[in-house]
Amino acid sequence: MVLDEATGPQGAEALIADGDYLGREAVVKIRPPKGYRLPVLDSSIRASRTRNEARIMHEARAAGVRTPCIYDIDLKECTITMERISGDLVKNHLDSHPEDAPRVCRMIGETIARMHTARICHGDLTTSNMILHDDSICLIDLSMGCTKAEMEDIGVDLRLLERAFTSAHTELEESFGVLMDSYYSHVDNPAAIRRKLDDIRNRGRYT
Ligand SMILES: Nc1ncnc2c1ncn2[C@@H]1O[C@H](COP(=O)(O)OP(=O)(O)OP(=O)(O)O)[C@@H](O)[C@H]1O
Ligand SMILES: [Mg+2]
C-alpha cells in the first residue's frame, strides 16, 4: 500500500489518505488515537467503529446498494482500505448543478429505499456522505449505521436526512420532495414509514 499524506478536517474522527492497493486506486480511512480517552477504552471504541463500518458497508453492498469495495481492514491500527470512488460528492454536485437535482434526488431516494428494505440504516445520511459515480449513488461513511433496523431506526435515518438536506440545500426544497416520493415508491410499506417520520418530527417539536 502506497500512501499520500492523510488529510481530514481538524477535529474529525477519521482521516482519509489516497493511495493504491495492489495497483488499484484506494483510500485508507484511518481513525487516529484520541489522547483525551483512556488508552484501552480508546482502542476499543476505535476498533469497534472500524469493524462496524466495514460490516455495514459489506452488508449494504450485498443488498445491492453501491458502497466502496473493502480491500483490507486492520483492527489494531483501526484502518479500512477501500476502493476509491471517482466522482463528485453529491453535496458539491448539487451546489454546482442545481438543475440536475431532480434526477439525482430520484436516485438518492431509490438507493436509500433499497438500503432500508434490507433493514440497514446509514446513521449519517448527508449529501457529503454520497458520491455521484457513473450515474449511481455510492454511499460512504457508514460507521454510525446499523443492521436489523426497526421502523424507529428507519424513521430516525430519514429525519436526519431531511434535516441535513434542507439545511445544506435551502434552495432545493422541491427536489427533496422528489427524493421522498422516489423513496416511498420503492419501499414496501410507505404509509407506515410516513407515519413514523411524522411521529418523529412531532416529537422533536414538542419535547
Ligand atoms: N471510498 C472513497 N472514495 C472516494 N472518496 C472518499 C472515499 N471515502 C471517503 N472519501 C472522501 O473523504 C471524505 C471523508 O470521508 P468519510 O465521510 O468517510 O469520513 P468522516 O466524515 O471524517 O468520517 P466519520 O464521520 O466516520 O468520522 C468524504 O467526504 C469523501 O470526500
Ligand atoms: Mg463523512
Image (spheres, grey):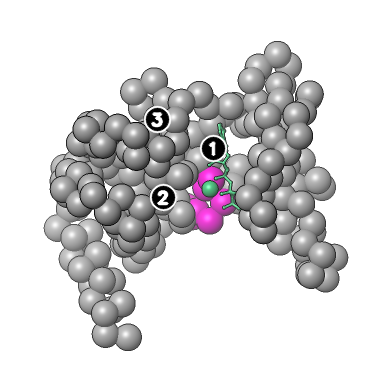
| Inter-mark Cα distance, 1 to 3 | 19 Å
Q: Residue at x 34, y 34 (%)?
A: 96
Q: Disc 1 marks which residue?
A: 58
Query: Which of the 4 quarters of the picture holds residue 160?
Result: bottom left
Q: Is residue 146 magenta?
A: yes
**Disc 2, ligand 2: is the CB inside 8 Å?**
yes
Query: Which of the 4 quarters of the picture holds residue 41?
Result: bottom right
| Inter-mark Cα distance, 2 to 3 | 13 Å
Q: Is residue 64 above or below residue 177?
A: above
Q: Residue at x 53, y 56 (%)?
A: 144
The quadrant of the rendered image in which ligand 1 is seen is: top right
Q: Pick out the residue farthest to the top.
A: 23
Q: Are there few (<14), some (14-19), or many (20+) residues within 10 Å of tag 2? A: many
Q: Residue at x 72, y 56 (%)?
A: 46
Q: Which residues are magenta?
A: 141-147
Q: Earlier in the sequence, mark 1 or mark 3?
A: 1
Q: Is residue 173 left or right of residue 130?
A: left
- Residue 147 visible in this rendered orientation of the protein: yes
Q: Nearer the viewer, mark 1 or mark 3?
A: 3
What's the amino acid at mark 1?
Answer: His
Place of residue 154 in the rendered image (x, y in percent of width and height, measured from the top left): 34, 58
Q: Disc 2 marks which residue?
A: 126
Place of residue 53 in the rendered image (x, y in percent of width and height, measured from the top left): 59, 47
Q: Secondary structure at mark 1?
A: helix
Q: Disc 3 marks which residue?
A: 132
What's the amino acid at mark 3?
Answer: Leu
Q: Main secondary structure of the magenta part?
A: loop
- Quarter of the image that includes the C terminus: bottom left
